[in-house]
Image (tube, grey):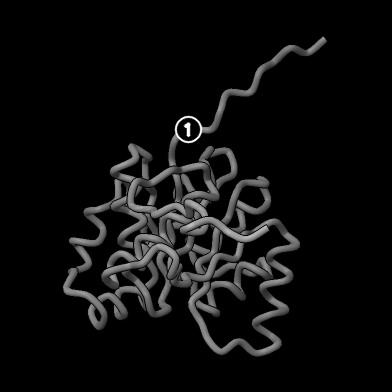
Amino acid sequence: MNTTVRAPAPSRLVVGISGASGVVYGARVLDALRELGVESHLVVTRAALLTLSQETDLTPDELTAKADVVHRLNDVGATISSGSFRTLGMIVAPCSVRTMSEIATGVTSTLLTRAADVTLKERRLLVLMVRETPLHLGHLRTMTALAEMGAVIAPPLPAFYARPDSLEQMVDQSVGRALDVFGLDWSAVRRWEGLKGGSEA
């Protein structure tokens, strides 16, 4: 009788940052993982670096310095391109429609989408913070296909019950709720504590 016990996955997460608006989500994911003691493996698209220069004051070097390990976008031989490299899963924050579509088809052209494909085939958690609106039928069908494959579609939407005082708090709430999917409890998240003043029966 085989009594082999599978060890839990190492505390490491793959982080992809693609070219949609909202590169700050990826930056804050990296900050959160560092606070939580989770090893981060980062891959960034060229479009994301363009967005970085338009939406933040961060330089590419400052962004990558937030990660424990940085992988080149065209490095198809990187550790995260193989299912034998064990992780908790992967988050793409933000996730552009192009990136989402590549992952859905399995026809991957970069290390980011290859790593996401690996995550799905290994039945690990893949969280896509899809950043697009409005959505046409093709977008919705692609999201449905991804959900059927096991991906979690987690658009970064504001949680007004948290009473955010700033844009930063709104970003952190979305990031923290996405990390909840991996069982990672980030202190920046404001949890629902029930209706104030009770409710009628």
User: Disc 1 marks which amino acid?
Assistant: Pro
Residue ranking furthest to the front: 200
In the picture shown, does residue 83 fall above or below 93? above
In the picture shown, does residue 171 fall above or below 178? below
Residue 97, image x, y percentages: 55, 79
Q: Residue at x 42, y 78 (%)?
A: 20
Q: Quadrant of residue 142?
A: bottom right
- For residue 51, side relative to residue 143 (left or right): left
Residue hosting label 1: 10
Q: Quadrant of residue 169?
A: bottom left
User: Split into 4 quadrants, where in the image is the C terminus?
Assistant: bottom right
- For residue 67, side relative to residue 186 (left or right): left
Q: Residue at x 32, y 59 (%)?
A: 28
How many marks on residues? 1
Residue ranking furthest to the right: 1
User: Split into 4 quadrants, where in the image is the N terminus?
Assistant: top right
Residue 153, image x, y percentages: 60, 65
Secondary structure at badge 1 equals loop
Residue 143, image x, y percentages: 67, 72
In the picture shown, does residue 108 fall above or below 116? below
Q: Residue at x 31, y 79 (%)?
A: 51
Q: 145 and 104: which one is in front?
A: 145
Q: Residue at x 70, y 87 (%)?
A: 137
- For residue 168, side relative to residue 178 (left or right): left
Q: 127 and 1: which one is in front?
A: 127
Circle 1 residues within 10 Å: few <14, some 14–19, many ≥20: few
